[in-house]
């Protein structure tokens, strides 16, 4: 049974009030959109995803759904500095990935040994930066997972 049929069946079985309360605790998917906590919409595009808070007209661009879900979960818990940091780190990660591609291309085209050595060093530095950024993002992902797990465990709907 696909998810849309399942959601329609759930709507028929569960009364409207309970269904609205359940939406506060679950993630639903419709086509290319994910609805989180009945407050956020994540639209998955080919090379990025866009998160929009329903109560606001502002949208945020993330490199993948994982970081968008992390941001939304931290925003739900009012951890604003952490949200800003996740957004900043995601943008840094995007820039690092672009730099890696450029440096790899230049390295492959270069004939001069000094140039190759320089761009190999820069490439290695960018890889280390990427590793540190991902490690910090993973800490925020762990925080978000912990909140979601605690919310689920304390829910009376399980």
Image (spheres, rainbow, N blue to C red):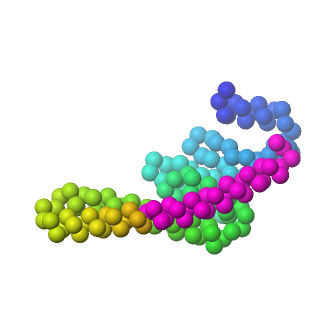
Q: 146 or 98: which is nearer to us?
A: 146
State the image coordinates of residue 92 (x, y, percent, origin top left): 46, 67
Is 6 on the left-hand or right-hand side of 116? right
Was residue 152 drawn as part of the magenta stretch in this picture? Answer: yes
Location of the C terminus by quadrant is top right
x and y percentages locating residue 34 in the rendered image: 62, 47
Q: Can residue 111 be seen in this view?
A: yes
Residue drawn at x 50%, y 61% is 134
Quadrant (top left/top right/bottom left/bottom right) for the N terminus: top right
Q: Residue at x 72, y 67 (%)?
A: 78
Q: Which residue lies furthest to the top in this view?
A: 1
Q: In which image quadrant can residue 114 be found?
A: bottom left
Q: Where is residue 144 in the image (x, y as percent from the top left)?
A: 66, 58
Q: Is residue 76 left or right of residue 19?
A: left
Q: In which quarter of the image is residue 108?
A: bottom left
By secondary structure, the bulk of the magenta-drawn segment is best described as helix
Report the residue that reaches farthest toward the bottom: 81
| Rendered location of residue 6, percent (x, y) | 72, 32
Q: Which residue is drawn at 69% across and 30% down?
A: 5
Q: In this view, does 9 lie above or below 109?
A: above
What are the residue bounds of the magenta stretch? 130-158
Asked if residue 54 can be seen in this view, the reply is no
* 25 relative position to 43: left or right: right
Residue 78, compared with residue 35, is above or below; it is below
Q: Residue at x 61, y 62 (%)?
A: 140
The foreground one among 106 and 38 is 106
């Amino acid at each position: 049974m696909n998810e849309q049929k399942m959601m329609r069946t759930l709507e028929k079985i569960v009364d409207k009030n309970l269904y609205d309360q359940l939406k506060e605790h679950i993630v639903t998917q419709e086509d290319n959109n994910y609805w989180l906590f009945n407050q956020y919409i994540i639209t998955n595009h080919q090379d990025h995803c866009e998160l929009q808070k329903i109560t606001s007209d502002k949208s945020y661009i993330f490199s993948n759904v994982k970081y968008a879900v992390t941001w939304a979960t931290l925003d739900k818990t009012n951890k604003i500095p952490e949200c800003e940091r996740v957004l900043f780190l995601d943008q840094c990660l995007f820039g690092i990935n672009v730099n890696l591609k450029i440096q790899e291309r230049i390295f492959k085209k270069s004939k001069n040994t000094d140039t190759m050595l320089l761009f190999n060093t820069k490439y290695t530095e960018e890889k280390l930066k990427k590793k540190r950024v991902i490690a910090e993002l993973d800490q925020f992902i762990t925080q978000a997972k912990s909140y979601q797990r605690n919310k689920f465990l304390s829910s009376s709907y399980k």
